[in-house]
Amino acid sequence: LCSVIMGRRPAKCYRYCNKKPFIKSRYCRGVPDSKIRIYDNGAKRTPIDEFPLVVHLVSDEREQLSSEALEAARIAANKTLTKFAGKDGFHLRIRAHPFHVLRINKMLSCAGADRLQTGMRHAYGKPTGLAARVRIGQILMSVRSKDQHRAGCVEALRRAKFKFPGRQKIVHSRKWGFTKYNREDYLRLKEEGRLRMDGCYVQYDNHHGPLGY
């Protein structure tokens, strides 16, 4: 018997969403762990007021991004942001999560393997990795920081783009931080006392509800 450890297949083998979503379940066992484990980097506990600037990396294609590509992009962006903004000057968040299981039909490729190989018989493959299925316009990564670090945030996401197949766009957000409010609305609501801090988000206080609010 002979078994050869093969290298990873190129992204073109798993890039397209041409199969049904296939996730880890009680029927699909033996799935390897995702390569990306950390989804928040930098000063993630920083209050919402300190980081008003937000820049997004947006997918421009419907495709699959492997967990290895997401991890490589996270490392590249984190390294660049640390260089330009300092380790406490930004909050980077990965917004795409890999749940789709990739399969491989392993073939033996050595002397004497021809009598062992089955070709396309029983060709349903074994789990080999994970990928995130993304649509056009979906946000892949977001960075919040101070306004003076705008150029550094754009450069970090530009370098992260090289780790992904397909096309992506870098977008400046009008929102304040990771909230759903535009900058002018955020400042107005805060002045009116309508906002309550909630980590890196805010809750809208409509002055109703239990006594004591």
Image (cartoon, rainbow, N blue to C red):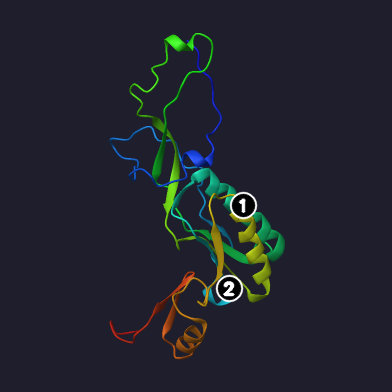
Label whose residue precedes the other's in the sequence (2 or 1)? 2
Instruction: Give amino acid for label 1.
Output: Phe
Residue 17 percent across, percent down from the top left? 40, 47
From the image, tell me which residue sits under label 2.
51
SS of the residue under disc 1: loop
Instruction: Give amino acid for label 2.
Output: Phe
User: How packed is label 1: few (under 14 Cα within 10 Å), some, or many (20 or more)?
Assistant: some
Give the label on residue 162, or none: 1
Q: Is residue 126 visible?
A: yes
Give the label on residue 188, or none: none
Residue that sits furthest to the right in the current view: 83
Q: Is residue 46 visible?
A: no
Residue in the foreground of this view, choosing between 3 and 181: 3
Residue 97 percent across, percent down from the top left? 44, 52
* Residue 213 drawn above or below residue 32: below
Residue in the foreground of this view, choosing between 211 and 194: 194
